[in-house]
Amino acid sequence: MTAAEFRASFSLHFPDFDLAPKFELGPEMAVLFGASGAGKSLTLRALAGLEKPDRGTIHLNGHALFDSEEEIDLPPQDRRIGYVPQHYALFPHQSVAKNIAFGLHDLPRASRAARVSELLTRMRLEPFADRRPGELSGGQQQRTALARALARRPDLLLMDEPFAAVEEDLRAHLREELLRIQKEFAIPVLLVTHSRAEAYAMAERLVVIREGQVVQTGSRDDVFRRPRTPGVARLMGMTNILQVTVADGSAPEVLTDWGNLKLTIGTPDSYATGSSLAVGIRPEEIRIAAAESQIQPANQLTARLVKDEPQGADHRLQFEINNQLLEVRVSHPEFMSLNLAGGQERTLTVQPSAIHVIPDPD
Amino acid sequence: MTAAEFRASFSLHFPDFDLAPKFELGPEMAVLFGASGAGKSLTLRALAGLEKPDRGTIHLNGHALFDSEEEIDLPPQDRRIGYVPQHYALFPHQSVAKNIAFGLHDLPRASRAARVSELLTRMRLEPFADRRPGELSGGQQQRTALARALARRPDLLLMDEPFAAVEEDLRAHLREELLRIQKEFAIPVLLVTHSRAEAYAMAERLVVIREGQVVQTGSRDDVFRRPRTPGVARLMGMTNILQVTVADGSAPEVLTDWGNLKLTIGTPDSYATGSSLAVGIRPEEIRIAAAESQIQPANQLTARLVKDEPQGADHRLQFEINNQLLEVRVSHPEFMSLNLAGGQERTLTVQPSAIHVIPDPD
Amino acid sequence: MLTPLLLSLRVAGLATLFAIVFGVAIAALLTRRHSAPANVADAVVNLPLVLPPTVLGYYLLVLLGARSPLGAWLESVGIELVFTWQGAVVAASIVALPLVVGSTRAALEAVDPDLRDVARTLGQSNTAIFLTIMLPLAWRGLLAGGMLAFARALGEFGATLMIAGNIPGRTQTLPIAIYDSVQAGDLASANRQALLLTLVAVALLVSMRYLGSALAGRKMRDRG
Amino acid sequence: MLTPLLLSLRVAGLATLFAIVFGVAIAALLTRRHSAPANVADAVVNLPLVLPPTVLGYYLLVLLGARSPLGAWLESVGIELVFTWQGAVVAASIVALPLVVGSTRAALEAVDPDLRDVARTLGQSNTAIFLTIMLPLAWRGLLAGGMLAFARALGEFGATLMIAGNIPGRTQTLPIAIYDSVQAGDLASANRQALLLTLVAVALLVSMRYLGSALAGRKMRDRG
């Protein structure tokens, strides 16, 4: 057995779609991130035992929940997995307390009451114990669904878009609460989202899914700043992807040609001279020099501003260079202090360490 | 008659909700922005003639579409208003061309065909003319719905969350296209959204609605940077709202006391000494000084970093000062170069011009 | 002088036609209306669903008989409904009507209301919208209602027996003929007549199920 | 020796009870199943909706008569269904069954499937989930189906006449008694009997409409 508490690798075939995810989780907050239609909800349902994979294995704490070779397929009732679907699916005809007690039917009455009351306290739901779900706010509904799922002390908790039903200004607070609860219960929590900001805000581990396949798994900063493929790079908002040729390939500072320009790349690896690399640069990592004196030792590129798309707090700028567009993001105050205007030529600087070599150009 | 092409001021009473918006529009791209449940869709429906207000007036190009006193209530058929509901409501049993021709029934056959073919070209829909809506992508569906609404050459176009049904990475492109189309047709377009980023990206004029009332109307930067109430300030992401007392109230640099601290505020107005003001500061307008030498002539505040919430490209930081939290937003590269760590005391700077006096503290 | 089969087809066919014409009109008027008069109209239309057929037949007999003002007037203009096949059509139309109304109304209410709203902003009259948008999108429901109506009309026994009687060759429809055959101990005829009606019923049932499953258009679960 | 009213209530009451017991079980088994056997079972259950009552009655007569193996066996264990009120119960149960199945099934399928899924991850057996989640959320549909079933059973005429006959005091239910009264020219009796059944029908209709509108729970449009 590996150290991972949870391992899944299975495939499930549909007429128009193949789901074949593969990943491991420890007792951490993990986020399954992907575009809509990538297979996120379906993956959760398969893990919970609500959809049956065609083949593969799902292991939790060393026990097989599903194993097509061994013909093991535990029903959802026996998987010790908590599941919170997208709109919480609270039982509308039962009070908050009854909802929470629903999974505790096999406990004696006294311990059941004790567990429910403990969870009501921990989730700050006591004042609402006798209310029906329809009388609760989005956040209270979410806490009730969580309490109900956690009541049975599951070994893994699955949550499908848990913030979709909550007003935007409450989300930050609920995210923190969820992170605290995960630490308290110390079990793996796998949360589904299609929002990059939410994935980043929540994930200790990020599992990126695309067209039914897990394309990258890692710590959130690993995936965010060191995507393995151009597809993941784009999903993560690394919008500048350049094709360069290695001129001097010895680490830690690889010299490359980008068209007629030179780019220095910071990397722990060495590359063969003449080989072609795909590199990615996040738009916020490109800085616009205010004055010649401020230019730091870094890659310097002279580019023409062709488009300014103000986004309120930020500006999304397009610079033309090398017959290609570079996207640059600056904050509004910085934009103002730079006195930028369309058509201007400016010097852009990029730290070698901010240029990421994409290992698997596809 | 005023210069505004479109004016609306009406009220519509529901058991649990009162809708009473009031605003004017010129031939521009306007965004009706508010939280879900604020009454945005209902407002559009009332303008289109699909809901009947209890009282008030709606005028378009000098003609009354609705006037409760004059007992005028034009049916939707006669309002010359194009309406695109949230999921486009394309007729699923008709081809793209038939959908576009639907509103042209009163034209002779030849001119109808000419108009449809012109719109197919302008909206780049020729290749899909014979397809059913179910066979189109989200963007193509949106263009079809737009073409259908514009075919009758309306004097006002209403669109309800036009990007909700479109994948996120396509939205930027579709927004630009819509802006281009508005310029081409040169009519007022009123678009509903609950997304601040989208409102900012689209709006020339921003109409902010809250609990059924229009709380502010203005150019997008006016509303974004100079909200009239704390409620609008929060909706616009101006998260730092401080109560200060005027020490020397003569414009253009008003001196104020914020607890034991001094704040200089740039404002065209003068205020009476001793009066109390609510001021707002956007989180990206607060800068963290890297070194003493870099401190510019501005308000300087020494504050302790109590929380770092990384959001991928940015960090949302909470600084404690004056027994209050200040939210500061910095980009990830800036965060890294500042060597920030929790508990540290740092000097924050705020330009006087970045401190906005909220005119109507509520 | 018609065979029970031909008479049955004529009665059920005409009754279905009437039920569809009036039923679609009533469904169109009642769709998404919740006013008090609409509720009363809806209840009246649906009464035959819960009223025993013989009760309905008895009321028709009283209402259309020569002793009632309506019956007298009808007689004066040359329409005889009591103990005629036309009376059977009236009875079958009334029992079939709520089936058409219910099915059509459900199908009309399943059409996205935004379609109708958008069509109005595109300048089309309500009648044109009903004919070009609502009906084309609700025809499966209408068809299913029509089939149910035909099945019900074809099988009508109690109300028909009361109003039209059991006159061989004139008002003896197939369901009544079966009763007669059994009473007369003619099991060969009863068998043949029952089989005929069963085949029609099964064919209608299969068609309706096909319509229904095409209607439901089984969708895959959202992948998320 | 029972009056037609008491006999009718006994027959319709028992038939409704049987229809609900079997109907709910069948609805539970068929809900969200689309296998070939489920489709066939569904078609068989719904056949009485489209089959003429006299045809159904004729088949029951053949199937349960002393000459059939089933009838002979039933007779041997002391159950007589032909020309008895018990036979009327069988006929009424069969015609009422699809109404309970249809209404209950629609109500069960309207329950958010996520509720059932979540309940399964919470360790509850499928039976417990059906009893504590599905039924409590679908009871209005079940009740509406039961009322429709009672109305249909109470009004049953054709099939009952075939299998149970028209024996005053033993198998003469109210709908049959009305027919008899009219045949005998006893319009006073017919009037009284028709009024009685009409009142019951109207009461059921009003209750069902109340249930239905509470069920629909008219919602306000999304304000957006």
Image (spheres, coloured by chain):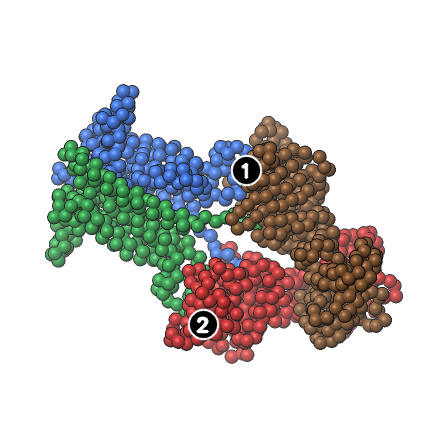
Chain colours: A red, B brown, C blue, D green
Instruction: Report the residue at 78% width, 69% height from top.
Output: B261
Q: Quadrant of the N terminus of chain B?
A: top right
Between residue B29 and residue B304, name the one nearer to us: B304
**Chain letter behind tag 1:** C
Which amino acid type corresponds to the residue marked 1 in the rendered image?
Ala
Between residue A52 and residue B34, name the one nearer to us: B34
Secondary structure beneath dot 1 equals: helix
Q: Quadrant of residue C3?
A: top left
Judge whether C186 appears above or below A65 on screen.
Answer: above
Say if residue C220 shows up in the picture. Answer: yes
Drawn side of residue A330 relative to residue C188, left or right:
right
Q: Position of residue D58 (x, y in %)?
A: 19, 43
Task: Name the mark on residue A116.
Answer: 2
Please tell me if label 2 and label 1 are on a single chain: no
**Chain letter behind tag 2:** A
Task: Identify the residue under disc 1.
Answer: C119
Q: Position of residue D28 (x, y in %)?
A: 34, 57
**Crowding at mark 2 (Cα within 10 Å: few <14, some 14-19, many 20+):** many
Drawn side of residue D59 relative to residue B312, left or right:
left
Instruction: Report the residue at 46% width, 76% height from top.
Output: A63
**Crowding at mark 1 (Cα within 10 Å: few <14, some 14-19, many 20+):** many
The Cα–Cα distance between marks 2 and 1, rounded to whole angstroms, is 53 Å
Q: Position of residue A55 (x, y in %)?
A: 47, 66
